[in-house]
Amino acid sequence: MIALLGIMVHNADAVEKVNGLLHDFRGSVLGRMGLPLKEQGVNVISVVLNADSGEINALAGKLGGVSGVRAKALYGGV
C-alpha cells in the first residue's frame, strides 16, 4: 500500500528522535522531503511509504508519541 505521511515538528529537540524513527522504517520509505520553516517555528516533512497499513500506523503512532510532533497518514487506494 502506498501512503503519504505528513509530519510537523514543532519542537527542535524532537528532530533527532523523528529522524531515528524514519531510519528504523527506512525499508518502507520510497522518498522524503523536509522543509525547515524557521520563521514559523516548524519543520514539515513529507514521506512516501510503501508498506502495509499496520506498519504505516505504527510509524505514525510512534511519531505522534514524540513531544512536539504531529503525524498523519493519507492512504492511496485503488
Image (tube, helix red, strand yellow):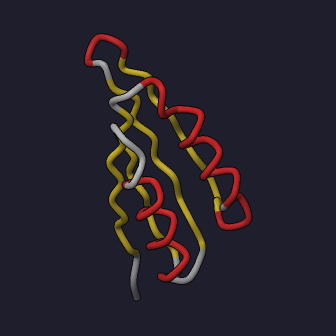
At x 44%, y 24%, the residue is 12
Name the outermost residue toward the left. 40
**In the displayed structure, would residue 73 be above or below residue 8?**
below
Instruction: Left or right? Give the position of 32 relative to 53.
Output: right
Q: Report which quarter residue 60 is drawn in.
A: bottom left
Task: Please tell me which residue lies in front, 64 or 74.
Answer: 64
Q: How many marks?
A: 0
At x 51%, y 52%, the residue is 47
Residue 37 image position (x, y, % from top left): 36, 20
Residue 76 image position (x, y, % from top left): 40, 76
Residue 44 image position (x, y, % from top left): 39, 35
At x 69%, y 51%, the residue is 23
Name the outermost residue toward the top. 39
Residue 34 image position (x, y, % from top left): 50, 34
Task: Please tell me which residue lies in front, 33 or 66.
Answer: 66
**In the displayed structure, would residue 55 be above or below residue 28?**
below
At x 38%, y 35%, the residue is 9
Check the picture and name the quadrant holding the C terminus.
bottom left
Q: Report which quarter residue 38 is drawn in.
A: top left
Task: Please tell me which residue lies in front, 2 or 24.
Answer: 24
Name the outermost residue toward the bottom. 78
Task: Please tell me which residue lies in front, 16 or 35.
Answer: 16
